Amino acid sequence: MSFLKHFQERLGFLPANTVKSLSGSPRVWIHGASLGEVRVAAAIIKSLQAKLPGCTIIVSTVTEHGRNLALEVFEKEIPVVYAPLDLPGCALKALSSVRPDVMIFLETEIWPAWIFTARRLGIKLALLNGRISPRSLKGYLKFRPFFRSVLKNFDAFSMISKTDADRIHAMGAPSGRIRVNGNAKYDHTIISPDPAVEREMRRILNLAPSDRVIVAGSTRGGEEAMLLDAYERIRSRYPEILLILAPRHIKRADDICALIRSRGLKCRLRTEIGRGKTERTAQILVIDTFGELFNIYSVATVVFCGASLVPLGGQNPLEAAVWGKPILYGPHMEDFQDAKEMLESAGGSLEVPDSRELAEAFLGLLEHPEESGALGHRAREAALQTQAAAHKHAEIIRMLFKNGTFYREDIHDH
């Protein structure tokens, strides 16, 4: 039923009031399929508006969840529509209504009919925050002549990594139009940490500067038991060490506390400690508040990224990396593969194959603080390199509009 909703828009008939609201210049249409792409779009748009004041932007999505997030993020400042079906007639109707100067596709969005139609109308095309997975590459390469004919219509490819750049080049994209500019998905997390945050968090958690802390972020069902197994081994050498468990879904906090107490261990909920409440003395703390995990990473000695010892795609490791923390995770980091590869290539993180190796990895880092500190330093350096990815992607758009005309020489093959 969700696909039938706003079906007129999917046929290319955009609301008249939306079309009338598009009055500024230059005019940019940004398309992202779903939730992840909307977040990327938000970061790029913020940079673009600073570079091109007065530009008009419209955003399209495919999924209803993506549309709802876009409406929430952009409120009434930027119109949001459903993307037209990838049929020449639908694309022509929508593009003729909006009349964009530049059409932006995000990440993996390659819509042949839409792209061919935009080119025929003289609209410039760019793929931003581009990524090509190994699985999709195999399919693309089976039809390389066709996709080469599609990709030659683009003026620019602004890719996340060199691997992504190599893959789209293998598909037929002209090498001179390809740039590597990082992942805008992480722009909102890559901020300069405030030392005052760590001081305040240590006060709240009743921690001395020398106290050792393991923070397990965004854990999922089954992982807490593994972490407790590891913790019980670690306590034999470090009896005062604090374990902080931050479940991905805080409604599980009471069940996690029950699991901890069933092992004869003491714990507290985050909401039970702090100003005007009980002082933390228990050696295990379970986080049952929203939005605190980034700040809690500030006090960590070692960090574990959850959803990775179970096959659930992992957790963003860069939030801990910017604090300069050594990072561990399991083998299931598929949702953050690019961040994982970036940290590993810099020597800033370690993968543990299973729960049995987890305690040994923790102990290795705790027993060698200089090596642990170096690991954390490399993690921070790698994370900071991803800063301003959205700025770089937005710059590709600006380059197409230098002095009011398309500035093709910076991008095209010579």
Image (spheres, rainbow, N blue to C red):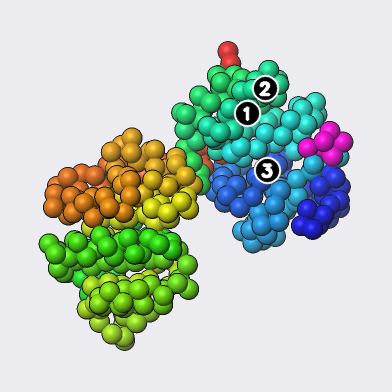
SS state under label 2: loop
Q: Give me the disc on residue 139.
A: 1
Q: In the rendered structure, which amino acid carries the disc numbered 2?
A: Phe
Residue 360 can be seen, yes or no: yes
What residue is at 41 percent from the left and 77 percent from the top? 254
- Identity of the residue drawn at 78% across and 53% down: 3
Q: Residue at x 36, y 64 (%)?
A: 224
In whole angstroms, how far apart are the C-alphas of marks 1 and 2?
A: 7 Å
Amino acid at the residue labelled 3: His
Where does the magenta region start and end?
86-91
Disc 3 versus disc 1: distance between alpha carbons?
22 Å
Foreground mark, 2 or 3, reads: 2
**Relative to 66, is 233 on the left or the right?**
left
Of 7 and 256, which appears nearest the observer? 256
| Label 3 SS | strand
Residue 259 percent location from the top left of the image? 35, 73
Q: Residue at x 47, y 37 (%)?
A: 182
Graded by Cα atoms within 10 Å as few (under 14), some (14 to 19) or many (20 or more), the crowding at tag 3 reads many
Query: Any magenta on residue 88?
Result: yes
76, above or below 330, in the image: below
Whether residue 237 appears in magenta in the rendering, the answer is no
Residue on which the image places disc 3: 31
- Which secondary structure class fits the magenta region best? helix
x and y, in percent, of residue 31 in the image: 68, 43
Mark 2 lies on residue: 143
